[in-house]
Amino acid sequence: MSDPIRVLIVDDSRAIGAFLRQLLAADRGIEVVGQALDPYEARSMIKTLQPDVLTLDVEMPKMDGITFLSNLMRLRPMPVVMLSSLTEQGAEVSLDALALGAVDFLEKRTPESAEERARYGRALIERIRGAAGSRLAITRTPAETAPPTLPRSETAADLAANWSRPLRRRALAKGSARWLLAVGASTGGTEALRTVLENFYHPEVAVALVQHMPEKFMAPFAGRLNSISRFEVEIAGHLAPLQGGHAYVAPGDQHLEVRCRDGRLISVVTEALPVSGHRPSADVLFGSAAAQCAPATVGVLLTGMGEDGAVGMKALRDAGALTLVQDRNSSAVWGMPGSAVKLGGAVAELPLDQIGPTLQRLFEEAVAPSVQAAG
């Protein structure tokens, strides 16, 4: 048997610490090695206990959690799961924490009913396990148990040469979006999406985004993306047209689908049951694009825990779409991209910093092919 995941709780409330211990005790593969009541105590306990994962409260005495996290990631990077309230301020702080390098976050609360406590405990255990398997983890997943990588990743030039002409030939009606970029992400995805949108823009591409995140986070998240991107980023509306040069974020706790009517794209927002354990689900977005506009779509699956998006990406690829996944080395958690590769849904696997430039070259050549591509 593998060694248990060693967790250090950093929280000034002994009662909260005891509650978290009780929840984590349900998983024999997790061991709580201690509780630090403030960041200075945490610094000392990290050195002596060598934990694999921290849970970190945002509001701490002597030093706030964000300042401590910033120092930790600079001096001794390690997987951290933040605990914060799901208020508007809590959402902003959690997004700050993710930008600084926290792997994931969870609402800080103490559910009253046994059912709610069990559900909350499962969510906490899932995040601890995801953090322990992340790129920042001290103990990594054994290579023999990891999903296979593609034998070879195509370069930006290869992808542009092979896919720009089919995209040009299958573009949708002018006057709206001519192409769709469908993107799914989860753990680590907020910063991955930021990197992609900082390095890609095309006025004839509409972007549809699914990021696993609570509803109260969606507006602040869309606002942050809008501040760094040339795309106009907004929350997707029901039966709203998708315009080129705009990016549409799935609302919290609702699925986002796309439809094609008379060569024009519209968004459909539903409260159907969760798919692959999620709502919104990347599988739902990708599956709708596969059925409606696959030849004019590029699908991208970024870092994330679990398997959401793998089935939908396979459907996209089978329907003729170009499908790209973030590679293992640049992913915080290679669960979702790795599942797509394992299922055969990925055409190419790219480092995060190459995805935006590759999309840029691809769509530019779809509009105005280079001499080399035209030949």
Image (tube, grey):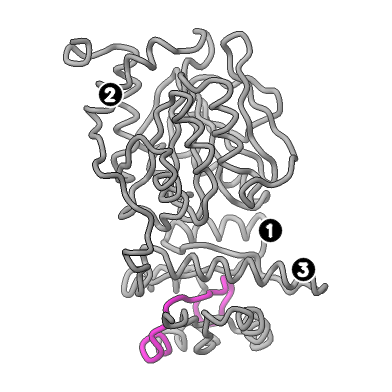
User: Residue 134 vs residue 292: left or right?
Assistant: left
N-term mark: 1 or 3: 1
Residues at discs 1 and 3 in contact (Cβ within 8 Å): no
Where on the picture, by quarter, is residue 239?
A: top right
Where residue 168 sits in the image (x, y, percent)? 38, 12
Which mark is drawn over residue 24?
none
Judged from this view, the residue extending furthest toward the bottom is: 48
Read off the residue under disc 2. Answer: 160
Residue type at mark 3 is Glu
Read off the residue under disc 1. Answer: 87
User: Residue 375 vs residue 27: left or right?
Assistant: left
Gap in angstroms between the C-alphas marked 1 and 2: 44 Å
Where residue 262 sits in the image (x, y, percent)? 61, 8
Where residue 190 sits in the image (x, y, percent)? 48, 49
- Determine whether the residue tagged by mark 2 lies in a helix, strand or loop: helix
Q: Nearer the viewer, residue 85 or 186?
A: 186
Residue type at mark 2 is Ala
Q: Name the mark nearer the viewer: 1 or 3.
A: 3
N-term mark: 1 or 2: 1
Q: Quadrant of the C terminus?
A: top left
Rendered residue at 68%/82% (across/down): 19
Rendered residue at 37%/45% (across/down): 326
Read off the residue under disc 3. Answer: 116
Q: Does residue 250 lie above or below 212 as drawn?
A: above
- Determine whether the residue tagged by mark 3 lies in a helix, strand or loop: helix
Residue type at mark 1 is Thr
Q: Which residues are magenta?
A: 44-63
Residues at discs 1 and 2 in contact (Cβ within 8 Å): no
Rendered residue at 47%/36% (across/down): 314
Badge 3: few (under 14), some or many (20 or more) residues near its Cα, within 10 Å?
few
